[in-house]
Structures are given as C-alpha cells and as structure tokens.
Image (cartoon, rainbow, N blue to C red):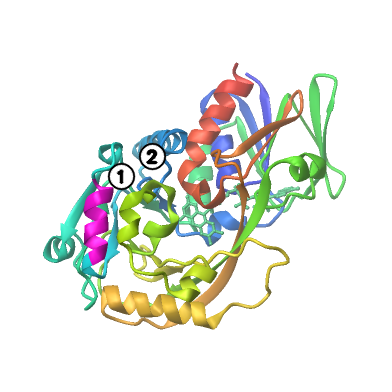
Amino acid sequence: MSRVLVVGAGIFGTMHAYFAHKAGHDVTLIERDPRPMSASVRNFGMVAVGGRAPGEELQVALRARELWGEIASDHPSLTFRPSGSIVVATAENHLDVMHKVAQYPDAHLRGWTVLDRSEAQDMNPGLQGRGVEGGLFCSEDAVVEPDRVLDELRETLEFSERFTYFPSTAIDDVSQKGTEVVATSHDGRKFLADWAIVVPGADHTTLFPGLFSRAPLRRVFLQMARLADPGVTLTTSIASADSLRFYPGYQGDALEGLEPVRPLVRDMVMQLLLQQRVDGTLTMGDTHIYDEPFPHEMREDCYELLLDDVESIVGVRPEVQTRWSGIYSQNTTGAVCIREKADERIIAVTGPGGRGNTLSPAIAETTIRELIDA
Ligand SMILES: Cc1cc2nc3c(=O)[nH]c(=O)nc-3n(C[C@H](O)[C@H](O)[C@H](O)COP(=O)(O)OP(=O)(O)OC[C@H]3O[C@@H](n4cnc5c(N)ncnc54)[C@H](O)[C@@H]3O)c2cc1C
C-alpha cells in the first residue's frame, strides 16, 4: 500500500482517488474550491461512446463505459442512466448519411441503429418536433448528473479510513524530496505521500507551468444553458445532426451527403446537445472557441440557434433559466489525455478535451495500474 495524494477534485481527480483507493492505497484528495466548480460540474454529464474516434479512443471509451457500469452496480446511489442517445435527423439527407455511417466497420461496437421517425418517437416519446425524420440511436451512451456525480463518488469513499478529502485547499507547490512527495498549500500546510497525481483540469499555470506549456495542450471555451422542464420526458440524450460534422466517429465519405453548414454553426463549431436532468430541466449546448483570450460575454445568437433546433426536435421552446460558460483542457494530438511525470513520483494528467467525463474511469484505472502499481 502506498500513500497517494491527488491534487484537483474534478472528475479526473475523483476517479483517480476512486481507483487508487480500490487498488488498496491510502488516498488524500485535495481541492482548491469549497466545491469543485470547473468543467466537471459545467458539462452535460454524458458518457458518450458513439462519436469517439476509431482505434484507441473508442477502445478507451468502451472500457470507460464498462467501468461506469461497474461503479454504478457496486454503488446504486450513483445517478447513472444507461439510456443511450439519438442523433436526430431533421432532413431526409441526414437519414441517408446515417445509413452509410451505420455501415462503418466498427459500428457494432458503438451499438448504432438507424431509426425512422416513428421508431425514434417510440424510443424517445419526447421527439415531437416537426423537424424529426428519424435518427441514429447509440445504445452504448449513458449519462451521470454533473452536479451530483463528484459528491456521489466521494461518498462511496468516505466510509473508509484510507480516504481523506480536503476542500478549500489550494496547492501552491508539489515537489519530491527523496522518495517522498510534499504538497504545500496556500496556507502553509504540508501533505506528505509516496505518490502525487496532479489533475488540475484547465489550470495549466499554477503547478508545473513548464511541463504544461511544453505539452501539446490548448484550452477550449464553451457556452451552455439550463432550460425549464419542457413538460415531456426525453428518454435518451439528444444531439442534432450537426454533431455528425464534428465528432470523429462519424467522419468519412458518408458526410458528403450533408447540406452546407450554417455559417454560425461553422464559425462557432456548434451543435445541439440536449440532456434532460433527473429534475426534468434540460442542459443545452454547445459552442467552441479555441483561441485565447476568451470572451467574457455569452453570444445570444448562439443560444437562439440552439433553441431553434430544440423546437424543431422537441416541439417546444422552453425558457432559458441559467447560462454559463465552461473551459476544458484539450491535447491537440488526438491522444486520450496527456499523462506525464513531473518527477519520478509526481504524475500530471489532463487534456481529455470534451471527452473527460466519459473517459475518466479508464484513464484513472490506467494511471494507477501502469504507473503506481507497476
Ligand atoms: C461545457 C462543457 C461540456 C462538456 N460536456 C461533456 C460531456 O457531456 N461528456 C464528457 O465526457 N465530457 C464533457 N466535457 C469535458 C469534461 O467536462 C472535462 O474533460 C472534464 O470535466 C475534465 O475533468 P478534470 O477533473 O480534468 O478538470 P476540472 O473539472 O477542471 O477539475 C480540475 C479541478 O482541479 C482543481 N485544481 C486545479 N488546480 C488546483 C490546485 N493547485 N490545488 C487544488 N486544486 C486545484 C480545480 O479547482 C478543479 O476543481 C465538457 C466540458 C465542458 C466545459
């Protein structure tokens, strides 16, 4: 058994703590904020396998999906719904594209089925919009609740004497002294361990700025909103057909059948993603900006376009209750993350991009197995 210190309690930090504890280690999890409030709580909570790139990314996503299922069955208090997703066709040509996509060699791994309008509405009775022509169902997709999942995962550990959590504790320095690592907090407390795993999300500057600035990383800015309960139940996650353009799993000649992209969709790299929460409200997004400095204002034209798409798919235009932005860390090589040693016993992990909620259990499992337990 080793003492493992995890700095950052977003979904990456929490999953690393979970798998280190599961492997028998003594775990300390440290978070700067009173409650984590970065990407991991600002997202859709989607465990999205369907659109992952062929090869390593899909394999890691499939392993992660399996692990999410195992965690949920070990801990029934986790709000995990293996409810699948539908990319909604709102034109005949979308269905043609989906039929071709569903022939890709790895389609069976993703659990894709093309649905006509009535099959899509049987699967998800909330698809009552005039635009709905059918869709591409993905049986492997699932969802967790971003405003609960970190608490729920930590609660599975808090019964244990081998787990301690320190919120409101910003770490200013992590260094190795001999075979021990020492993390120092802003108020001078020292945390000693055998290993440190630094998982700071999109904060590339507080700890190991040299390592993160040399790594192939960028930050990405997104716009999101919460919509009022539309009064219908959406039994699956929803994506508009624009998502076919952006997710690597759909790329190929099939996409030549799509209509020209709308200019705002192209400029803001947008698609409608829509997730009903357990309280009935909807999480709606998203847009992408890749160049810093990021804006401090939300673009209303983006929200209007997304709401048009919601109306076309769901048949109602719910009121916007809240708006927020989010920033994630993305590696630019296509790898599932960057995982680098800052010192012999200090491991930095970030850069999963818009897939971090999905991939986190598999990435954490690998860190613990290959670097700490090796
Ligand atoms: C709007 C949006 C929607 C998304 N939707 C999805 C989705 O549906 N599905 C999906 O798979 N992915 C999604 N993603 C991506 C996913 O949210 C991220 O990849 C993931 O949350 C990254 O987790 P993380 O723990 O690395 O980072 P974070 O959530 O940013 O957590 C890092 C934590 O480290 C703490 N920290 C940093 N530095 C220190 C320090 N020095 N001392 C102490 N604590 C520190 C921070 O306070 C923070 O709580 C989305 C992202 C965004 C922004």
Q: Is residue 207 above or below residue 344?
A: below
Write down the residue under mark 2: 65
Q: Is residue 63 visible?
A: yes
- In the displayed structure, does residue 68 sit left or right of residue 174? left
**What's the residue at 43%, 69% (across, down)?**
284
**What's the residue at 21%, 78% (across, down)?**
130
Q: Quadrant of the N terminus?
A: top right
Disc with the residue nearer the chain's start (2 vs 1)? 2
Specify whether residue 101 is painted magenta.
yes
Report how many numbered discs are placed on residues in the image: 2
Query: Range of the magenta residues?
Result: 93-102
Of residues 312 and 234, which is closer to you in this image? 312
Mark 2 C-beta to ligand 1 under 8 Å: no
Specify whether residue 292 is painted magenta.
no
Of residues 87 and 166, which is closer to you in this image? 87
- Rendered location of residue 48, percent (x, y): 40, 49
Write down the residue under mark 1: 140
Q: Main secondary structure of the magenta part?
A: helix
Q: Quadrant of residue 158?
A: top right
**What's the residue at 57%, 71% (across, down)?**
324
Query: What residue type is disc 2 on?
Result: Arg
